Image (cartoon, rainbow, N blue to C red):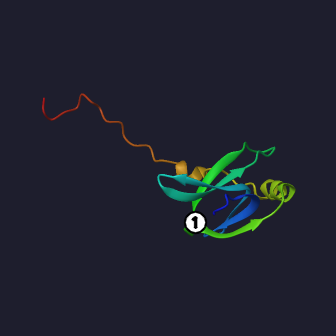
Amino acid sequence: MSESFEQFAIVELMGCVVFAGLVTEQVIGGQSFVRLDVPETPGQPAFTKFFGGSAIYCITPCDQTTAQLAVDRLRSHPVDLWKLQIPELPQANPYDSEDE
């Protein structure tokens, strides 16, 4: 019989990224993921991340107070803004056509 996992923890990923929050398991598209619910802090809203098992280096279970302290100090973000900076593409003019 398998038990469902639900535990506050500090999660370390390959690439030296660290998050903290409530860890559970979730299946998406038939694949198993580790779900991490990061609680709200004064500087940011709560957010959720999903990780594949091979991305995780270490999970350290802890109590809720320790996880909250880690969240406050880690200042993790749901998305790295620099990854969203998309160069502006030239706008196509629908009236420019070689067929005319």
> How far from the left and from the top, in percent, is residue 17?
66, 64
Residue 65: quadrant of the picture: bottom right
For residue 87, above or below residue 3: above
Identify the image quadrant of the C terminus. top left
Identify the image quadrant of the N terminus. bottom right
Can you identify the residue that label 1 sits on?
53
Instruction: Tell me if mark 1 has few (under 14), some (14-19) or many (20+) residues whose alpha carbon lies within 10 angstroms of its own.
Output: few
Residue extending farthest to the left is 99
What count of labels does the image hold?
A: 1
> Which residue is rendered at x = 75% and y = 68% of the image?
60
> How far from the left and from the top, in percent, is residue 11?
70, 64
Residue 97: quadrant of the picture: top left
> Which sits in the foreground, 5 or 65?
5
> Which sits in the foreground, 58 or 80?
58
> Which sits in the foreground, 94 or 43?
43
> Which sits in the foreground, 86 or 52?
52
Residue extending farthest to the front is 1
68 lies left or right of 13: right
For residue 92, above or below residue 65: above
> How far from the left and from the top, in percent, is residue 77?
67, 51
Residue 90: quadrant of the picture: top left
> Which residue is rendered at x = 66% and y = 69% of the image?
16
Q: Amino acid at mark 1?
A: Gly
> How far from the left and from the top, in percent, is residue 38?
72, 51
For residue 12, above or below residue 49: below
> Which residue is rendered at x = 72% and y = 42% of the image?
45
Q: Secondary structure at mark 1?
A: helix
